[in-house]
Image: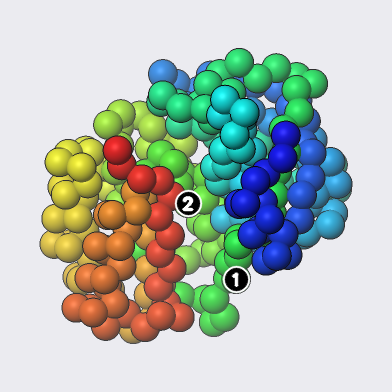
Amino acid sequence: MGHGWQGVALKLMRGKDFTITVRSNERVSDHLHRLTFTDGGMLGATGTHPTMWVRLWFDDDGRPHQRAYTLVDPDPVAGTFGMEFVLHAGRASDWARTARPGDTIEATVQGTGFTVPDPLPSRLLVVGDPASRPAINSLLASMPSTPATIWFETSDPSEADGIAHQDTSARRVVRVPRRDGGAHLVETVRASLPARLDAGSHVWIACDTATTRTLAAFARRQLGVPKERLHALGYWRAS
């Protein structure tokens, strides 16, 4: 399957293409499915970094369709990693539900990037949801001694149970029910983030695109968070 104009654009931006192979599949919950892969040489060629993601290519009635997914526990030596798929109607979810060991899929590495701040932040202030949970775990693991507050939006509170290092004296997960298309999350974070913010904090936001933009603008314009201490990326679009 060709990648169409999107693939051409990614090539021009030095995207690297690989074929990865399914190793195992597991239903984690009613809304979440986990697959593991062999990397087809990808990790050796690109290296790894916290919150690393790749674009997977799916067939949409003969047209290329791509979605980005965060790598879970990437192991460059073994050449393996996992991915978690939030299940809903769509080509990517349909593929994940039926994928079996030995199935292959094409992946492109382009656009991903995160460097652990130096010096380390005084606190991580994180906003996310099930789609960004693997990235949140990767972020927390990259700074294991840094205190953190994580606002986690979900329609199923148990989905927050997979967040690493949660609810300790230094790290707290705040479960936020998804209501009003993300408006409840915006209200909750706007009310509580300022009290936790100091000059050394790092703010990391990754939820639906509209909510991410709203909260990033709040952090930047109203709270004065400098761009080097703010990372914001919309992980999906609400329909």
Is there CB contact under 8 Å for labels 2 and 1? no
Q: Amino acid at mark 2?
A: Ile
Q: Residue 212's image quarter?
A: bottom left
Nearest to the observer: residue 191 or residue 2: 2
Residue type of the residue flagged with mark 1? Thr
Q: Position of residue 60 (x, y in %)?
A: 56, 29
Residue 213 on image: x %, y %? 30, 62
Q: Which mark is residue 136?
A: 2
Whole-percent x and y of residue 71?
63, 45
**Cα–Cα span, label 2 and label 1:** 14 Å
Check the image and report above or below for 77 versus 121.
above
Where does residue 112 sit, x and y in percent of width and height?
A: 60, 60
Which quadrant of the view contains residue 87?
top left
Give 48 or 193, whichever is nearer the viewer: 48
Q: Is residue 16 left or right of residue 202?
A: right
Q: Who's the residue at 27% across and 31% down the image?
A: 155
* As drawn, 224 above or below 16: below
Pointer 1: what residue? 115
Quadrant of the image for the N terminus?
A: top right
Which disc is residue 206 wearing? none
Is residue 38 at all visible to an observer of this figure?
Answer: yes
**211 or 134, which lies in front?**
211
- As drawn, is 161 to the left or to the right of 220? right
Q: Is residue 157 left or right of residue 24?
A: left
Q: Which residue occupies 68% across, 55% down?
A: 8
Asked if one can make out residue 37 in the rendered structure from this viewpoint, the answer is no
Residue occupying the point 44% across, 21% down: 29
Q: Residue at x 45, y 31 (%)?
A: 86
Crowd band around label 1 with a 10 angstrom C-alpha radius: few (<14), some (14–19), many (20+):
few
